[in-house]
Image (cartoon, helix red, strand yellow):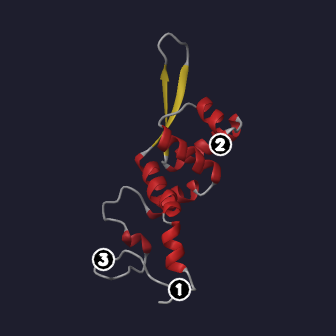
Amino acid sequence: MATNHGHAVDNQVPEDPADLLPEDSVLTLDEYLAMHAAVGHRTRYEILYRLVHGGEMSPKELEAVLDIDDSTLHYHLNKLVEVGLVEKRQQTERGQDGLYTYYRATVFGEVTLTEGVDELIRGEQDFEALYDSSSEA
């Protein structure tokens, strides 16, 4: 049984999904979809999860907790930065030479994670009850 749980203004579902965006939206529909696609990869999800729930981390810290190599980590970090879920910050440390890089989740990253995949995981029991074909309507 298909149900329509979409959000529509005045019970009207727009023909073009992009019309759901506010007139002054800071992002396009394609940019929102790129964010969701990026977090759909297990490694990128885990990176974003660590940054949202653990705060800002260096690449070395991420490598250690995720147990992945440097090139794989940077490939996925670059994807997350590219779509705006993570931001990269470089700074010099007092008494040290060179720049140190840190990554942190953006507001979009935090919302995409906590209101997206994490919410789906938390709502699994509700979904099971909603879509259980053995229950009577």
Q: Nearer the viewer, mark 2 or mark 1?
A: 1
Q: Can residue 93 be seen at all in this image of the molecule?
A: yes
Amino acid carrying label 2: it is: Tyr
The answer to whether residue 43 is above or below residue 20 is above
Of residue 9 and residue 56, the one placed in the foreground of this image is 56
Q: Can residue 87 be seen at all in this image of the molecule?
A: no
The local crowd at label 2, few if under 14, some if 14 to 19, many if 20 or more residues have their Cα within 10 Å, is few
- In percent of the image, x 65 and y 35: which residue is there? 63
- In percent of the image, x 57 and y 86: which residue is there? 134
* Circles 3 and 1: CB atoms closer than 8 Å: no
Is 85 displayed left or right of 20 in the figure?
A: right
Q: Disc 2 designates what residue? A: 75
- In percent of the image, x 51 and y 72: which residue is there? 127
Extreme residue toward the bottom, this view: 137
Looking at the rendered structure, the secondary structure element under dot 2 is: helix
Mark closer to the chain start, 2 or 3: 3
- Disc ID at residue 135: 1
Q: CA distance from mark 3 to mark 1?
A: 31 Å
Q: CA distance from mark 2 to mark 1?
A: 46 Å
Mark closer to the chain start, 3 or 1: 3
Mark closer to the chain start, 2 or 1: 2
User: In the rendered picture of this protein, how many numbered marks are placed on residues?
Assistant: 3
Horizontal and vertical percent position of residue 41: 63, 55
Horizontal and vertical percent position of residue 10: 28, 80
- In percent of the image, x 59 and y 58: which residue is there? 40
- Disc ID at residue 9: 3
Amino acid carrying label 3: it is: Val
The answer to whether residue 86 is above or below residue 60 is below
Is 13 displayed left or right of 131 in the figure?
A: left
Horizontal and vertical percent position of residue 59: 60, 32
The answer to whether residue 49 is above or below residue 104 is below
Horizontal and vertical percent position of residue 62: 60, 35
